[in-house]
Amino acid sequence: MPKPIIDTDACIGCGACAEACPVDVIEVDDVAVAANEDDCLGCGNCADTCPVGAIEIED
């Protein structure tokens, strides 16, 4: 199953990834976290949208 791997040290907490996710896998407080990673579709929208490259999709 795919899941987002988030580098919390690099994350700037902008929320772009959460907005880009079609199934609400990512939540942002101070930094992004994969709150519902079992729902991940592996589409890569979050990784493509992240302005600092803090997200990778792992299969």
Image (cartoon, rainbow, N blue to C red):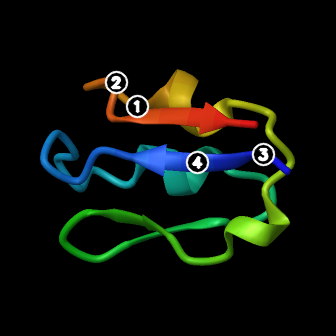
Q: Which of marks 2 and 4 is nearer the N terminus?
A: 4
Q: Name the residue under label 3.
A: 2
In the rendered image, residue 11, in percent from the top left (x then y), is placed at: 22, 46
Q: Where is residue 7 in the image (x, y as percent from the top left)?
A: 29, 45
**Residue type marked 4:** Pro
Question: Does residue 27 sit above or below 42 in this rendering?
Answer: below
Residue that badge 2 annotates: 53
Amino acid under disc 2 = Gly
- Report how far apart the C-alphas of labels 1 and 2 lie in the structure: 5 Å
In which image quadrant can residue 44 be found? top right
Q: Are marks 1 and 2 in contact (CB under 8 Å)?
A: yes
Q: Which residue is drawn at 40% across and 31% down?
A: 50
Q: Name the residue under label 4.
A: 4
Q: How far apart are marks 1 and 3 (CA)?
A: 17 Å
Do labels 4 and 3 touch, CB within 8 Å?
yes
Callout 4: helix, strand or loop? strand
Measured in 3D between alpha carbons, the distance from the residue under mark 2 to the one under mark 4, in whole angstroms, is: 12 Å
Q: Is disc 2 placed on a helix, strand or loop? A: loop
User: Three-letter amino acid code at disc 3?
Assistant: Pro
Quadrant into which the C terminus falls: top right
Q: Considering depth in this image, is 53 or 1 the residue closer to the camera?
A: 1
Q: Nearer the viewer, residue 59 or 55?
A: 59
Q: Is mark 3 on a helix, strand or loop?
A: loop
Foreground tag (2 vs 4) = 4
Q: Is residue 55 above or below residue 17?
A: above
For the point 13% across and 48% down, the residue is 9
Q: How crowded is mark 4: few (under 14 residues within 10 Å), some or many (20 or more)?
A: many
- From the image, tell me which residue sits under label 1: 50
Task: Mark 1: give few (<14), some (14-19) or many (20+) Cα within 10 Å.
Answer: many
